[in-house]
Structures are given as structure tokens and as C-alpha cells.
Image (cartoon, coloured by chain):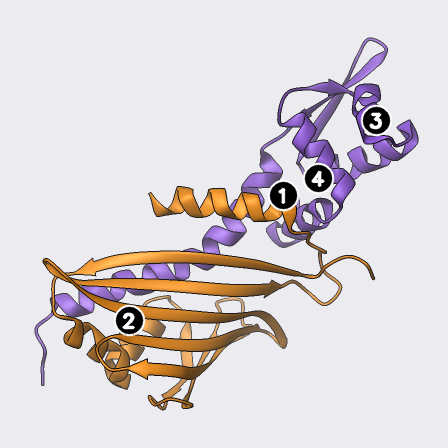
Amino acid sequence: MSERSVTHSTFVIERVYPTVPERVFAAFSDPRKKRRWFAEGEGFAIEAFTMDFRIGGREQACFRLPDGRPCRNDTVYQHILPGRHIVIAYTMTLGDQCISSSQASFEFVLANNGTNLIFTEQAAFFEGADGPQMREAGWRKLLEQLAEEMAR
Amino acid sequence: MLSHRVHVDRVFHALGDPTRRAIIEKLSQGPLSVSSLAKPLDITLAAVLQHLQVLEKSGLVHTEKAGRVRVCRMETRGLTVVERWIDDRRSLWERRLDRLGHLLDEPDDN
């Protein structure tokens, strides 16, 4: 096979929350709070949500999609600096197929009126094992344009 | 109507080939006949037609006969499918961070 089967994408999402970084950070470190914004609200049945918030600790969220397929998020906490940043690595699994592997950072930056949360995800997307082969050149450009569009 | 899933597969497959991407890049500047597509790409007419078939099936290119010439032009349907696929992934996090905002708007209960 000379074709590539992984596509990479990096994107950044920023949000400003009108509260101090410590309080935003607490919504990540407290499992009860984390579950509320991270796992609930998508309309999926949550079959499990466990987290061990420390460097090297794991988090797993298991969902059941409306079509009956299981969907799973497996996370490892790579680095934590309280009130400043959290870096994770995670995979997403749909049915029995891993569909992406990502490194993601949350940075909590003190801003004038609160906290600027900067989320950066660097992802490798896999399609089905016999799925599409993706090449980077035109593709990367498309993703960059898209990221700019979304960032507006 | 193709299922979204099948359509995504087709578009990614279509975009996975450098010659097909070169065709799309050329057509993004304006419609061209099959022969004027083949010339700069240095491939046979038959090969171009084969690639065009893949591109047409995935909704990236539209071709039609104008007299004795087949004219090709970009179609946005295929690209929209790809955009949506990526958008769906990304907006999961956007929705999450919006929910985080709502949660932070509430007073702490402990």
C-alpha cells in the first residue's frame, strides 16, 4: 500500500469564562463537574464515567449512541499544572473500531474579565481499516481553511 | 441518495489520489474540457476519464457534454460532506466547552 491511511488535524478553540482560572480548573479536576459538561448533554446514554485525575491517571467515558453502537473515550492525563494547564492523550472508539487518537491541551490563562481557556487538539484520524486513503497536501490546506473559518 | 457514511468514504477515497487532487486544483480555477485537463497532467484521456468518474461519483466534479466536448467543473457537494464530517468532530468539543460555560455560570454548591 503506497496510500496513506491517517489524516492529521490541529485545531484550537478558545473560550473566555467570566471567572477565575482556579474555578475553571476545578470543573476539570472534580469528576462530578467534569462529567456534567464533558459527558452529559449529548443525548447519549452514559454507561460509565470514571476518572483518576493525576498525571498518568486514566479516564474512561462509555456511551451508547442512539443507533445502539457503543462509543468510548479513553484518556490518559499526560501533564497537569493546577490552575494552569492540563494535557491529555485520548482515543475515540466507535463500535469496535478506534477512529482517532489525539493529544489535547487545555490552558487556563488569566484574562482581564476572567479566564481564557485555550483548547488545542492535535489529532490523527483513522477511517475504517479498509477505508479511505488520505493524502496530505490538498487536504491539509482544506483543513487549515476550515479551521480559519471555524475560528471566526 | 447515498448514505452520509458511504458518501464520506467516497470523498475521502477520491481525495486520496494525487492525480485526482491535481484535477480538482485545476478545476477550482474554472471549468475545463477533458482534453485540456489531460494535457498538463501528462496522462492519457482514458486515465483522466477514469479519475473523473471517481470524482463525479463522490460529488466533487460535474461533467457534461457540450457538443463534441466534455466539460468538467467543480461541484461543492463533495467538499461540503468533508467539511461536515470534520465540523461534527470539532463541534463536539465546542458543545462541551459551551456546557462548561453554563456550569461555571451556576454558583458553586459546595
**Amino acid type at mark 1:** Gly
Labels 1 and 3 within one chain: no
Q: Amino acid at mark 2?
A: Trp
Could you tell me which residue is drawn at 83 percent across and 13 percent down?
B69
- Please identify which colour was used for chain A in the image: orange
Closest to the observer: B63 or A139?
A: A139
Alpha carbons under labels 1 and 3: distance apart: 19 Å
Circle 2 sits on which residue?
Answer: A37
Residue A134 picture quarter: bottom right
- Image quarter of the N terminus of chain B: top right
Residue A138: image tag = 1
Q: Which residue is mark 3?
A: B38
Q: Chain of mark 1?
A: A
Q: Nearer the viewer, residue A17 or A95?
A: A17
The CA span between labels 2 and 3 is 53 Å
Against B82, residue B60 (above or below) is above
